[in-house]
Image: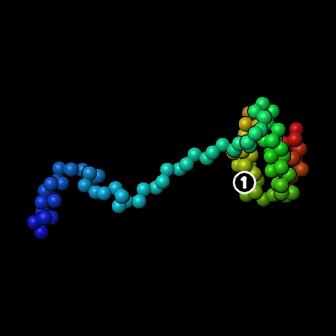
Amino acid sequence: MQKRLEEVQANHKKHFSETVDKREYNVAEERKKPTRFVIAEDEPTMQPKMWQSAIRDAAYYFDSPTLQQEIKMKKTLQSKYDALFTEGWRPPMQTRSDLVTWVCE
């Protein structure tokens, strides 16, 4: 009991954060920033391999997609190929044919 009393008196003026071991608490890991989608050995000015990849992703899109599939494709286009398209781009997401035509143009 005396040992506990001495411990309490020693920590009386300290903040709670100074008296506890941080390793005992679960701290959420920091979110890692996603890495930019890059194709190795691609020509830096015209980026033909990046365009080829964008066309391939559009070609594997659904003929009549659901709303969730449209959202997923839009996020894919934004995260991977945003640098290829002009500012303010809006792809037609209703069918595969529309999307492929838009990417090719």
Percent position of residue 45, x then y = 78, 30
The structure residue drawn at horizontal position 75% and vertical position 33%, both measured from the top left corner, is 44
The structure residue drawn at horizontal position 36% and vertical position 58%, both measured from the top left corner, is 23
Can residue 67 be spotted in the picture? no
Q: Quadrant of residue 24?
A: bottom left
Left or right: where does residue 7 sit relative to residue 85?
Answer: left
The structure residue drawn at horizontal position 29% and vertical position 52%, both measured from the top left corner, is 17
> Foreground: 75 or 32?
32
- Type of amino acid under label 1: Lys
Left or right: where does residue 59 sit relative to residue 42?
Answer: right
Q: Residue furthest bottom?
A: 1
Q: Residue furthest left?
A: 2
Above/below status of 72 relative to 51 = below
Q: Secondary structure at mark 1?
A: helix
Left or right: where does residue 28 sit relative to residue 40?
Answer: left
Which color scheme is applied?
Answer: rainbow
Quarter holding the C terminus? Answer: top right
> Foreground: 45 or 16?
45
Percent position of residue 72, x then y = 72, 54
Can residue 54 be spotted in the picture? yes
Above/below status of 96 relative to 83 = below
Number of disc labels:
1
> Foreground: 66 or 43?
43
Disc 1 marks which residue?
72
Left or right: where does residue 103 sit relative to residue 36?
Answer: right
Above/below status of 41 relative to 75 = above
Quarter holding the N terminus? Answer: bottom left
